[in-house]
Image: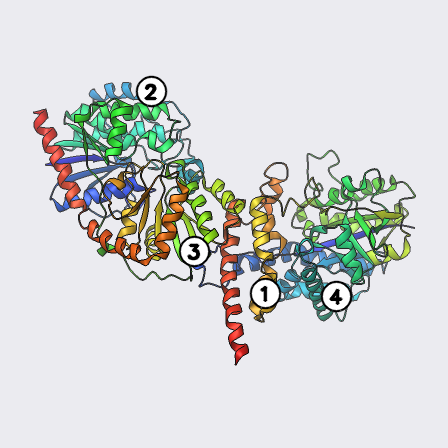
Amino acid sequence: MRTICFYFQVHQPFRLKPYRFFDIGEDHDYYDTFSNKSIMRKVAEKCYLPMNSLLLELVEKYAGKFKVSFSISGTALDQFEAYAPEVLESFQKLVKTGHVELMNETYTHSLCGLKSKEEFIRLITKHQERIKELFDGYSPKVFRNTELIYSDEIGATVAQLGYKAILTEGAKHVLGWKSPNFVYLNAIEPKLKVLLKNFRLSDDIAFRFSNRSWADWPMTTEKFVTWINQIPQEEETLNLFMDYETFGEHQWAESGIFEFMRHLPDTVLNHSNFTFSTPSEVVENIPPVGKIHVPIPISWADEERDLTAWLGNDLQDEAFDRLYELEELVKSSEDPEIQRDWEYLQTSDHFYYMCTKFFADGDIHTYFSPYENPYEAFINYMNVLSDFILRLKSTAVKKPKTVKK
Amino acid sequence: MKVLMFGWEFPPHISGGLGTACYGLVKGMMHQKTDVIFVVPKLWGDEEPLADFVNASSVTIDYTERRFKEIWKNLTYLEVTSFLIPYLGPEEYERFTDKSLHDRIDVDESVFAKQFSFSGKYGKDLMMEVSRYALVAAQIAKDKSHDIIHAHDWLAFPAGIAAKEISGKPLVVHVHATEYDRTGKNVNLQVYEIERSGMEAADHIIAVSQLTKNTIVSKYGIPEEKVTVIHNAVLDASIIQHGARKKVPEKIVTFLGRITYQKGPEYFIEAAAKVLKRDENVRFVMAGSGDLLHKMVNRVAELRIATKFHFTGFLKGGDVDEMFAISDVYVMPSVSEPFGISPLEAVRHNTPVIISKQSGVAEVLQNAIKVDFWDIDSMADAIFGLLHYDGISRMFREMGSNELKKLKWEQVALKVMDTYQHTLTKNV
């Protein structure tokens, strides 16, 4: 059996509003509601709604022969509820068909997997509960970490939580001569299967689809099927992982991306020996070939496939360390707003905006950043964090008093 | 007496101390009932009506005037486009200059057009604007009667020279800063040349401090007796609108100025890190913008003090007052500061100040702690002391505001007018 596994990442961060030094100590509302709402509305119109309705049409038309999977971050779910409830409904409809799989991740698309096992587990549990609540008791069996960040250790934690599989990048420097088109096992907990993204074919759709200077433009379903037919027969799974916003947002409707997807199932099913599967089905049906060793974390970002989009420069490290040193204090607070802000401030996007790798990947970073430059992003984030620390400390100081009573 | 004065900026549209000083001086002169024609490249329309303002952008040049030709000849050397470092760094150009004005590569608005609308900023066309400003100055000097010409800093020096050539009236140039202060050792020779020719063409020079006079004499080769020191002053406390309220529990230590080499921002950061090691109950604020901003942000991150060290970006009017008002200590660590009005503004808000010995204001302000800009240990000690030992800061507050009463623009205006008198009699 040979199969294609589609996984789409759905995520929106709670962007911070311009927060000035003069606001510290007074203004505790950190979010740019206007832009969060308008971006959500825009992406809903351009991507989520039309693509969900196309997928529903395809899933119904092929009656189980065409399948996809999603991971929807908790922040995205929160924003659907607040700004685009019809998007949430359309996802619920898709899941109800039984041919669409949902995965778990950390609730707020956090980087805590790199810092605190306790927080990592807590935010995963929170995401589980949310998915259960919104999708009729649905309980995901497969995990994907923020930005496909993965290491042996992260995998081991995920295995302990009972997941069957985890997704990550088929990073060249990890695979070496090996192919991403197999099922692998976690090096520490071999009961956890590891699915690797085929970045060449994934990025043909996600990044190069509308690029007219690309030698293979325009990409057609026929061309795509020719390529997948060239994959050696013994390689059994083709993992196509990408941001869901690829459809209609990164690649505009005018590029033909929707039409491509509309015709892809037909071309694949009739002109290749590939089927479509969800991640659970892949790990159930395809035997693993061996362990994959990833001692140092990898991700799906940039040329390096490492963590440098979020961590590593002084701005990012300072922000990250100052945030996580608050963990103990936050846990001792019962204030729900403190809890919410603590979670939203962990979202990886905030650190992504502070990335100073201006060359090669810089252009993609600026496209996704609401700030003029990483320094502004840092200043704004630290102002917010400073106010958060003040609030946190004042609730921590108050607490013993109430205990004494 | 009627003064024809050439400036480059005027409140509320200012980027630094020059505009503030011009405002104070014009206000003081109005108090002394002196008529001032104040020319700026661009008027915005919301300037306080203190003088007979002339908008250089709306002056039409009459090219049939023969005498102008001489001026054009002398000005052509200015047209060379060059990387120019006036007051602001490149990031700040972007921040402060209206892009549509700034990026225009006009077809019909050349230096020699009949009318030319100035941006009045410090953008990439600065040299062209400076030359053009001189042409306009010649026209104004022809049209408006006056007794003496007064030009502020190098941007307006060519204008002053041109006006003098047309009207033959004596020229006083006012040096608020030199190229040496702004750039240290990497002096832009083109700017230096303009400064030197302005000083040489002038009948008399006003320097804002002894420090500046020393530079003028030693670096520009001007005879000592041609230079008079007249220190700047500060506006009355009465114009401050109160109501600023501190919202954080910590004490606040502030740097406020352009984040450029001249202002020594890195010394403030290093001192801050030292203080924070001993006392967590402080917040440091760096207000302003400039070409070193990103480097400073990086340094703060690297020192891991970013939850206690904040950047506000460039502050305007009311925010500046608020910043001063909520500060417990104000630090001006300038590497080279011809004068430095901002510490006086801090004192005006009852905020104790630490100033570098390398500043002109140190010559007039006694109730301040003075340290060498590079001496971050002393700076940290001084900050710590002012924050913790109430006695000193209280004393500085009380005596400082008494001191300010002697530093008034009315008096500065009187001294400037004495200089005019002196220059006029000498010229007769």
Is the residue marked by circle 4 packed among few (<14), some (14-19), or many (20+) residues within 10 Å?
Answer: some
Mark 1 sits on what residue? A330
Q: Residue at x 35, y 37 (%)?
A: B121
Asked whether, in this view, residue B78 is left or right of residue A124, the answer is left
Residue A86 location, x and y as percent? 66, 65
Say if mark 1 contacts mark 4, CB within 8 Å. no
- The circle on residue A93 is 4
Q: Nearer the viewer, mark 2 or mark 3?
A: 3
Which residue is depicted at the point 26% across and 47% down?
Answer: B47
Q: Is residue A12 above or below residue A399?
A: above
Disc 4 chain ID: A
Q: Residue A183 location in percent, x, y?
A: 86, 50
Which one is nearer the viewer's eye here, B381 or B209? Answer: B381
Image quadrant in which the C terminus of chain B is located: top left
**Mark 4 to mark 3: distance in Å?**
54 Å
CA separation in Å, label 4 and label 2? 74 Å
Image-based side of B377 in relation to A350, left or right: left
The amino acid type, in three-letter code, at marker 3 is Val
Percent coordinates x, y for residue A166 in the rendering = 79, 55
Question: Numbered disc 3: what chain?
Answer: B
Which residue bears the numbered disc 2? B77
Mark 1 Cα-neighbour bin, 10 Å: few <14, some 14–19, many ≥20: some
Q: Are marks 1 and 4 on the same chain?
A: yes
